[in-house]
Image: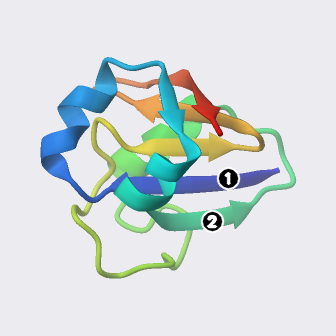
Amino acid sequence: MKVRVYFCREPDIQAALLNNNKLSKQALDTIYDLVWETEFKNILNVGRIWLKFVHEQNPFGIELRRKRSHGKIAAGDVIQVASDYYMVHDVGARKIQIIE
């Protein structure tokens, strides 16, 4: 199972993104930076991944990008688990739809 974590580059846009249940693929590529990509053999849920990013400095080893807009996962960031996408909130994450 492939897990990817995207951090939002624009802190001003994060509040507007939290109200939407949809995000376009183009917005994901332009507004977000792919920060982590990991392959897991065990099935994980998005809550466990979110907890790892909240509490640990290097949750799953070496990150893909060192230069990023913020150090820890924050509201408005996106976690991709297999083919499902989740928008991070202050506590937890909710599933969103990625449209082409």
Q: Is residue 18 above or below residue 5?
A: above
Query: Which of 46/25 is in front?
Result: 25
* Among numbered discs 1 and 2, the one appearing first in the sequence: 1
Query: Which of 41/84 is in front?
Result: 84
Q: For the image shown, how many numbered marks are present on the structure? A: 2
Please identify the residue farthest to the right as the structure is shown.
41
Is residue 79 among what the camera can see? yes
- Report the side of 45 relative to 62 (left or right): right
Residue drawn where x is 34% and y is 64% of the image = 57
Residue drawn where x is 21% and y is 54% of the image = 10
Residue type at the position of mark 1 = Val
Q: Where residue 34 appears, x then y in whole percent?
A: 50, 65
Pointer 1: residues within 10 angstroms few (<14), some, or many (20+)? some
Residue 37's disc number? 2
Secondary structure category for the residue under label 1 = strand
Is residue 32 among what the camera can see? no
Residue drawn where x is 39% and y is 20% of the image = 20
Check disc 1 and report the residue beneath it.
Answer: 3
Cβ–Cβ below 8 Å for labels 1 and 2? yes
